[in-house]
Image (cartoon, grey):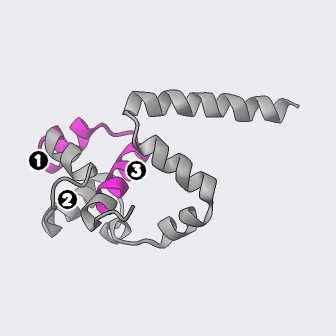
Amino acid sequence: MERTLAALIGAKIKMHRQSKGLTQERLAEAIGSTPSYIGRLERGEQNVKIQTIEKIADALEINASLLFSDENEQFLRSKKWVWESLTLLLQQSESQQHRLYRVLKEIVAHDEDK
């Protein structure tokens, strides 16, 4: 399934936001917007202005070009199970993502003990 540019940018916003430990509320506050707007952006349901991209990038402390670059995505797509796992995780709620991360972390720690 081919995703739109808005959906790709939204997924990257979500990924960077979560990697910084920010909620949609905190990101919205940082850019002078609402959490529902951030949610629509992340789901690819809302087009975004360049000025808003710049505000989001500043709030996330990243270069705005990262939201348009597909360099990392191409690498991840080449790792089939990593890409499918990431896609599955991004479809879950934030609390479910944390739960699944803890399970994965426990499995990896258990395998290292062997």
Q: How many marks?
A: 3
Q: Is residue 72 above or below residue 21?
A: below
22 relative position to 112: left or right: left
Query: What is the quadrant of residue 67 in the picture?
Result: bottom left
User: Residue 1 at x, y = what percent?
Assistant: 39, 61
Toward the right, the furthest residue is: 114
Q: Which residue is mark 2?
A: 55
Residue pictured at 34% horizontal, 72% vertical: 65
Q: Is residue 9 above or below residue 82?
A: below
Membership of 25 in magenta stretch? yes
Residue pictured at 34% horizontal, 70% vertical: 68
**Cα–Cα span, label 1 and label 2:** 9 Å
Residue pictured at 62% horizontal, 52% vertical: 81
Stretch in magenta: 9-35
Q: Secondary structure beneath disc 1?
A: loop
**Cα–Cα span, label 3 and label 2:** 16 Å
Q: Earlier in the sequence, mark 1 or mark 2?
A: 1
Membership of 97 in magenta stretch? no
Q: Is residue 8 above or below residue 108?
A: below
User: Residue 19 at x, y = what percent?
Assistant: 44, 46
Residue pictured at 48% horizontal, 72% vertical: 71
* Residue type marked 3: Met
Q: Given contact means CB atoms under 8 Å apart, are the residues at marks 1 and 2 in contact?
A: yes
Q: Which residue is mark 1?
A: 32
Quarter of the image that includes the C terminus: top right
User: Residue 14 at x, y = what percent?
Assistant: 34, 49
Query: What is the quadrant of residue 53 in the picture?
Result: bottom left
